[in-house]
Amino acid sequence: MEQGEGAPGAVAGEDRDGEGWRVIPALERLRQRAKDVLEPVHYDYFAGGAGEEVVLGENPRAYDRLALRPRILRGCAKRDLSVELPGARASMPVFISPTAFHKLAHPDGELATARAAAAAGTVLTSSMAASVPIAEVTAAAREVDRDAAVWFQIYLQNSREVTACLVRRAEEAGCSAFVVTVDSPVFARRARERTHPFSDLPPDIAAENMRDLPGSEPGALSDVEMSPEVSWEYVAWLREQTALPVVLKGVLHPDDAVLAVDAGVDGLLVSNHGGRQFDAAPAAAEALPSIVDAVDGRIPVLVDGGVRRGGDVAKALALGARAVGVGRPVLWGLAADGENGVREVLEALRAEFDHALTLCGGRGLADLTRDLVVVRGSGAAW
């Protein structure tokens, strides 16, 4: 497994049975299957990261460097895994982070992902660059569960008229929150895509939410724009355009977390874009505690990037996250076995997290506290 994807290694994270034989976790087995079935250019598009993929590998390794000190003899036969999120209640503290073009992984694309998320009782964040229009995504989720929650991820576009149109579409589709990605003033440089350049989509796949927007011809597609001119003033304008919760995705500095709270947003998603945007950024797990401290409980803090095991979920919650997002593992499940593969990913993380919570002596999510976290090998508290 490539270093950039956070492969389990001999020192950190490799699972072995009692006789020393390597045990392949469920998510890694799905990744291997996905790599077998995907076109190499599409696999590298999903798997790759920015620059030389340093932060891509650091995201999972940061969780491997942490351990949990369990509490004992707390007497609880059943745990409550449910959690309140902006505009949603989820059956577990795991949601699906936004990723683009699911039809590259499976013909059903985001429809399969939406059905799997709804069946698992959790939230799908549907990307602005999804290969299925948002109205169809929410409809698919609600065929499974009429109360299913879908969030809409958005990049603030140079044209506020375009942004406003996207906001209206998501509201009309029944989305329950917006996830605004704010870590992308420019497009990333990705070394892996120099080996397998990702330029043209197959003719039957497009960023369908970008069709029929203001300023374009009927039926035409507009480009997803990145702009270094986007500012806090634009966020304030967006806050005025909708009554739905607004979550900022891509916050890594505690001073920005304070500014976000002051701007009236409803949540933060600590994220380095899955290692896909800036190779000098810190690992998400390393950035998380300072953001939690800066916010000081005023709004929920979420995190994504590098979560591969239920134990990682428990560590993130102990560091102060309300819930964690997963991106690539969902794509591997989708490519490997469509809707069933995505459900396998979500249910594996649920079972592993419940197991970790039990071993930590927890009755519910609030029992995962920072005093449980130590640095592996040193025993030092976080």
Image (cartoon, rainbow, N blue to C red):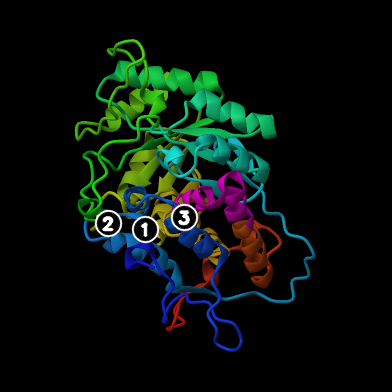
Q: Name the residue under label 3.
A: 34
Position of residue 137 measured from the top left corner of the image (x, y, whole percent): 54, 30
Q: Is residue 286 left or right of residue 52?
A: right
- Mark 2 and mark 1 lie on one chain; the one further toward the N terminus is 2
Mark 2–mark 3 Cα distance, whole angstroms, equals 28 Å
Mark 2 vs 1: CB contact within 8 A: yes
Tag 2: residue type? Ala
The part of the chain drawn in magenta is 327-347
Position of residue 51 measured from the top left corner of the image (x, y, whole percent): 21, 56
Quadrant location of residue 382?
bottom left
> Could you say which is closer to the camera, residue 24 or residue 142?
24
Mark 3 vs 1: CB contact within 8 A: no
Residue found at x 63% / y 50%: 92
Tag 1: residue type? Ala
Q: Nearer the viewer, mark 2 or mark 3?
A: 3
Tell me the SS state at disc 1. Answer: helix
141 to 294, vertically: above or below: above
Residue found at x 54% / y 25%: 136
Q: Mark 2 points at which residue?
A: 281
Tell me the SS state at disc 3. Answer: helix
Q: Mark 1 points at which residue?
A: 287
